[in-house]
Amino acid sequence: MPGRSKSRTKGAMGSPPGPETVIDRKRYLYFGGTGYFGLHSHPAVVQSGIRAFQKYGTHSATSRSGFGNNPVLLDLERKLREFFGQEEAVTFASGYLSCLVLAQALAGRYEVVFVDEAAHFCIRDAAAATAKPVFAFKHRDPEDLLRMIRKKLKPGERPLLLSDGIFPTFGRIAPLPDYVRVLELYDGLIGLDDAHGVGVLGANGRGTYEYHGLRSANCYFAGTLSKAFGGHGGFIVGQRELIRSAKFKTGTFIGSTPIPTPLAAATAKGVEVLRQHPEMRTKLRQNVALAKAGLKALGIPIEDTPVPIIAWSIGSEKRMVRVQHELMKRGIAIAYLKYAGAPTAGVLRVTIFSTHTAAQIHRLVEELAKIL
Ligand SMILES: Cc1ncc(COP(=O)(O)O)c(C=O)c1O
């Protein structure tokens, strides 16, 4: 029976993610996960999913190269195209796969791949799947990128740089203008996994390129729908030719079932809501500024950016786990992570939502001040 599970899984969520979230049957003030705009439980988003569930069932049970296309997926892709101001969009069942699809869709335009050493798992998997030589360069270091390209690229070869737009563990932003300057020397491309940037960064929420004011023809990105947009799945937007390659030259599109239809419908509504309400992004930025000012005053090293991820390390794993437990005893949940790019001992990570109130943010800072 729903809600009666005997499961003893630790950290099991019993409500949608939001400023208040039920974990292991207890309600916490929640600063975990990546539901930056609270769209995962937005009434219009949920209703859209329910209606599609009733009409279409769970999913198409075939890929889109068969009969698996449907008006819901096409509507989602139209909304993504409009949101990002691009010619075309294509979606896949998982955000994790979107970087792989991007790298495959760009095949034939590069011979060697350069990957940030702290890149997300999905980027490293994508690089490996290109079956081209892959080299890591130092985290967010354009000079090391240049050094590696000089060392590894043979005459006539072109580089593909793969990186996160925002790195998920510390919330740092990739130095894209510097990368562009390096890659221009070699007619190279950038393929960005902008999972945490899309919807969040830039005047229109178009992500890390928009944040940096970049519009180079050689800058490509993939994103996820599971974070800012409150839905599920991955996507690529861009020129018609790129999207055609993603659809017809990659196994992911040809050989897998698309986003389950109810989730595609919910996601389309999430994209629509975020487009119609830019004030949600303004609120997120205000909340991020408030949280960063408060945490900085506690001596936590803070990067002054609009990224809603704040992470820091305070020595041993034991100490950080203790801080997390102390906060939980006081009814506040933040993450303790060993994720891509984290030091061996892990990090404490706070994520901020547009739906947090100022009082909730103040409370986090006050309780942390007592514990630290
Ligand atoms: C940087 C980054 N890329 C990709 C993903 C995968 O996206 P999804 O969980 O939507 O498959 C994640 C994690 O969720 C992530 O943090």
Image (cartoon, rainbow, N blue to C red):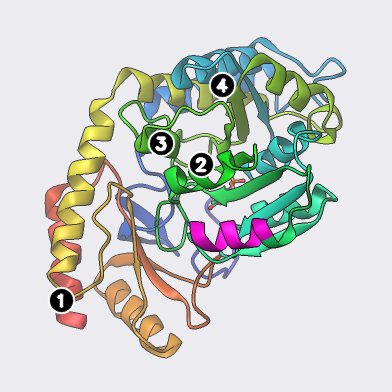
Residue that numbered label 4 is attached to: 265
Residue under label 1, please give it: 369
User: Of the residues tagged 1 and 2, which is closer to the observer?
Assistant: 2
The residues tagged by marks 4 and 2 sit, at their Cα atoms, a distance apart of 36 Å
**Mark 1 and mark 2: span between their CA atoms?**
41 Å
Residue beneath disc 2: 180
- The range drawn in magenta is 142-150
Q: What is the spatial separation of the Cα atoms under label 1 and label 4, in whole angstroms?
A: 43 Å
Q: Is residue 305 left or right of residue 10?
A: left
Which class describes the residues within 10 Å of circle 4: few (<14), some (14-19), or many (20+)?
many
Position of residue 97 measured from the top left corner of the image (x, y, whole percent) = 70, 43
Q: Earlier in the sequence, mark 2 or mark 3?
A: 3
| Residue 42 in view in this figure | yes
- As shown in the figure, which amino acid type bears the numbered disc 3? Ser
Q: Is residue 160 left or right of residue 250?
A: left
| Dot 1 or dot 4, earlier in sequence | 4
